[in-house]
Image (cartoon, grey):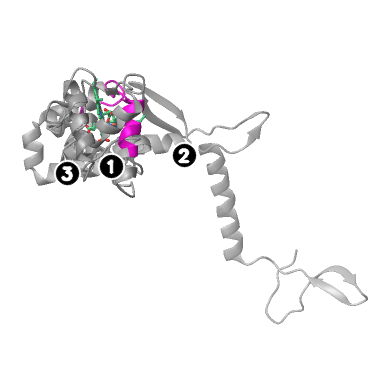
Amino acid sequence: MAEQHQGKAVQTTGHAWDGDLQEFNNPLPRWWLWSFYATVLFAVIYWIWYPAWPVAKSFTKGIGTVTYQSGGKQVTTHWNTRAELIEEMQTGSETLKQQAYLEKISAASYDDIVNDPDMMAFTRSMAKVLFADNCAACHGVGGTPAQIGQYPNLRDDAWLWGGDINQIEQTILQGRNGYMPAFGEVLSDAQLDEVANYVLSLSGHSVDTAMADAGRAIFQGKQGGCYYCHTESGKGMASQGSANLTDAVWTVADVPGAADDAARVEVVKTVIRNGVHRQMPAWRGRLSNAQIKLLTVYLQSLGS
Ligand code: HEC
Ligand code: HEC
């Protein structure tokens, strides 16, 4: 390989195509050569450090490692992006800040949290994520369910099981069993009509007053025994999770979605005929106490 000098004839490789088409034999430019050597060196270091070559059913693991916590133990593996992400999530500056806040919240009383704007802001942002991951499948994003009847709305200030901090915490910790027996076997169709009229009268709907009067006797008497769970006033009991029948909020019977008086009677009647059985799962053990605390404060602030 001869050097090409300015002015001298350029060497060729000696091959000729199509009679006179020749190939110059120029040396490679220095910058190009050095870049090339640098990439070779880079590749070798890369192979040594990172997983690189397929070998049989496995691959060369490289000497780089990542260490992270798993199940209370320290785990060291060969370098890989998954482990690196786990490590980052455990030791990143954001994570450490979150852990410090979580510890602060675990130690704080509910009053302290609610009265501290910083802790509240943190609570809201963490609880939103927890809610989306664990609760939204049933309760809907932001706490508003799509459909009356399936799951209670957690956004309004009407609570089946009570809306103060301790009651909400108990609901999440131990779960709730919303149960009302079916009255289809106990009451005749006419009686169901009557009691449905009475129930609607409690929340100020226009009803057939004669029917509602007959319904009151069923509701407040032995035959229906509705007062036993809903109380005589119809306001319900937090200890039973029995709905307040006197307000404009409906959690099982889709009264707001019914077109007219007859349709309203029908939806209420259907609930009384079929009863209700809804289960809120318990989260004790599945979420940490600190997480349940965050969710409790968040839901309480949504409701009020
Ligand atoms: C599998 C579905 C499901 C999931 C998941 C679920 N819930 Fe519920 N939740 C229910 C049902 C059903 C009820 C109504 C129980 C009843 O009828 O009394 C309920 C009731 C509640 C209530 C009581 C509302 C009231 O009016 O008193 C709260 C509070 C609540 N859920 C919070 C949560 C939180 C927080 C999560 C997530 C950690 C969650 N739920 C996850 C189904 C679910
Ligand atoms: C054993 C207790 C119990 C008895 C008895 C009972 N209920 Fe209920 N009722 C409940 C509970 C609990 C709920 C709420 C269920 C839920 O949301 O999970 C409910 C819900 C309702 C609803 C739906 C309210 C809404 O917001 O959508 C109506 C209507 C109703 N009851 C009417 C009656 C009538 C009428 C009777 C008597 C014939 C009666 N209940 C007897 C426990 C009872």
Please identify the quarter of the rendering in which residue 152 is found: top left
Where's residue 256, x and y in %? 28, 46
284 within the magenta span = yes
Label 2 CA crowd tier, 10 Å (few <14, some 14–19, many 20+): few
Q: Outermost residue toward the right?
A: 19
Q: Give the range drawn in magenta.
A: 266-290
Q: Mark 1 points at which residue?
A: 143
Task: Please name the amino acid that badge 3 sits on.
Answer: Gly
Where's residue 73, x and y in %? 35, 20
Which residue is at the front of the view, 106 or 210? 210
Q: Outermost residue toward the front?
A: 210
Mark 3 / mark 2, whichever is N-terminal = 2
Q: Tell me, yes or no, if residue 277 can be seen here.
A: no
Q: Quadrant of ligand 1?
A: top left
Frontmost of labels 1 and 3 is: 3
Please identify the quarter of the rendering in which residue 141 is found: top left
Q: How far apart are marks 3 and 2 (CA)?
A: 62 Å
Task: Please name the amino acid that badge 1 sits on.
Answer: Gly
Q: Mark 2 points at which residue?
A: 81
Mark 1 / mark 3, whichever is N-terminal = 1
Q: Outermost residue toward the bottom?
A: 7
Mark 2 / mark 1, whichever is N-terminal = 2
Q: Is residue 274 left or right of residue 234?
A: right
Q: Is mark 2 on a helix, strand or loop?
A: helix
Q: Name the residue under label 3.
A: 204
Residue at image point 29% right, 22% down: 179
